[in-house]
Image (cartoon, rainbow, N blue to C red):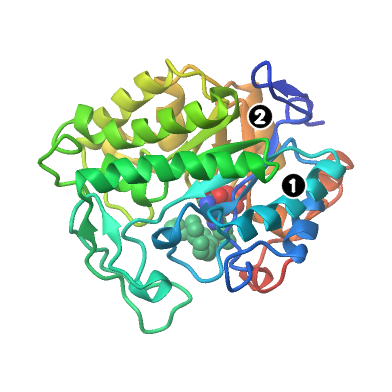
Amino acid sequence: MHTNLFSPVTLNPTLTLKNRVAMAPLTRCMAAADLTPTDDMAAYYARRADVGLIISEATIIRADAQGYPNVPGIFRPSHIEGWQKVTDAVHEKGGTMFCQLWHVGRVSHQVFHGSRPVSASAIGLNERIPRMPGLTYPVPRALGSGEIEQLIEDYAVAASNSRAAGFDGVEIHGANGYLLDQFLHYASNHREDEFGGSPENMVRFPLAVVDAVIAAVGADRVGLRLSPGAYANMTGDPRDKAVFQLLLAELDKRDLAYLHVGIFDDSMTFDALDGMRSSEFLRANYKGTFMGCGSYTADQADQGIAEGKFDLAAIGRPLIANPDYIQRVQQGEALVEYDAEMLKTLL
Ligand code: FNR
Ligand code: 8K6
C-alpha cells in the first residue's frame, strides 16, 4: 500500500526526504505576543516529524508582513531562539523542516503593525478580516521602488535567519493572494513602472526575491509556493496565464528544491488557465520537482505520484487532525476527521 508515498526522494545533493508526504504550511495563530514560537509549538511540530518534510506555518519576515493575530516571526533574535527550539525538537525525532517566509501585503490592517498595509497597487480587498470581528481590509498603499529593494533584502535576511534558527531550508510564500502573488495577478497589480504592465515586469519582484533567497541560503534549500489559479484573496484575469508561464520558465533555470501549488481543493479548475487545475498548469509549465496539495487523501496522493501528476504531496488538515497521520496511513488505520474546532488547540 502507498508504495509511492512512502518511498524516499532525493531533492538534490543537499536534501533527501524519507518519504513523499509533506506537512502543508498551516497557520495556527499560537505564537507568543511578541510573535516568538512557543514550547507547545515545538512539541506540536515534533509530533509530526515522521513526515518527509514539515513546512512551517507561514512566518512573517518583518512587522508589516502581519495580517493575522499571533503568527510567528523570523526577524527578531527571540524569534530565532524560539524557532531553534522547534527545529531542535523536530531534528531530534529525525525530521526535516523548512520555514515558510510570508508577507501578506494588502491582506492586513494597521491594528497588526500600526501602518497602512502595502501592496503592488492601491487596490483593496473588499472582505472582512477573519478572526477580527468588525474589521474589513483597508485600501493599501502602493510600494515605492526603493521599498521593493528593501523588501528583497528583508526576504534574504529572513532566509538567513531561518538557517540560523536550524531550519533545513525555506519555502517562499508566493501563493494565496499574499504580497508576492499581488504582483503576479492583473487584478491587484496596476503598476506602470518596471514592476507592472507586462509579464516581464510583473515577475520582476517575485523573481528578485527568489534570487536573493537563493544567494542567502543556496537553491538546494529553497522551495516556492505559487497560486496561478486565483482562488483566495484574489480575482483571476485571463492575462495572468502568460505571467505565470514566464515565471515558470525562469524558475526552471534555477534548480529550486521544489515548487509547491497553493490551493485548498485541487479539483478546482480555472477559466484563466484554459480550464486547467492549478497543479496541472504548474506541472505542464515546469520541469523541476513539484509538490501537489489540496484536499488529497493518502490514496489519491499515492496515485497522483504514480501517475506523475506531482512528485511529493503536501497534506494539511488531515495532519492537524492526526499527529500520527503517517503511522495510521501505513498501518491502514482510520483517520480522525478534521474539524475547524481543532484549530483552537495545538494537538
Ligand atoms: C492553511 N493553508 C496555508 N497555506 C499556506 O501557504 N500557508 C499557511 O500558513 C496556511 N495556513 C493554513 C491554515 C489552515 C488552518 C488551513 C486549513 C490551511 C493552506 C494549506 O497549506 C493547504 O493548501 C490546504 O489546507 C489544502 O490542503 P489540505 O488541508 O486539503 O490537505
Ligand atoms: C492562509 C493563511 C490563513 C490563516 C487563517 C486560517 C484560515 C482558516 C482556514 C479554514 C479552512 C477552510 C477551507 C475552505 C477553503 C477556502 C478557500 C479560500
Residue placed most toward the observer, 269 or 205: 205
Disc 2 + disc 1, Cβ < 8 Å: no
Q: Residue at x 48, y 26 (%)?
A: 215
Q: Residue furthest bottom?
A: 134
Question: Residue 79, image x and y in percent?
Answer: 62, 58
Q: Quadrant of residue 252?
A: top left
Q: Is residue 3 above or below residue 30?
A: above
Residue 340 makes an appearance in the image = yes
Q: Which residue is mark 1?
A: 87
Mark 2: give few (<14), some (14-19) or many (20+) Cα within 10 Å.
some
The kind of residue tagged 1 is Thr
Badge 2 amino acid = Gln
For the residue carrying disc 1, how many other residues have a C-alpha within 10 Å: few (<14), some (14-19), or many (20+)? many
Image coordinates for residue 8, horizontal then vertical, percent: 77, 24
Q: Nearer the viewer, residue 319 or 81?
A: 81
Q: Secondary structure at mark 1?
A: helix
Drawn side of residue 61 relative to residue 248, left or right: right
What x and y, as percent, mark residue 98? 63, 40
In the rendered image, the vertical position of residue 287 relative to residue 88, given as above or below: above
SS label for mark 2 = helix
Instruction: State the residue lying farthest toward the front.
Output: 77
Viewer-closest of 126 and 335: 126
List the residue tagged with mark 2. Answer: 303
Identified at 49% across, 28% down, the residue is 214
Quarter of the image with the C terminus is: bottom right
Disc with the residue nearer the chain's start (2 vs 1): 1
Q: Residue at x 42, y 15 (%)?
A: 253
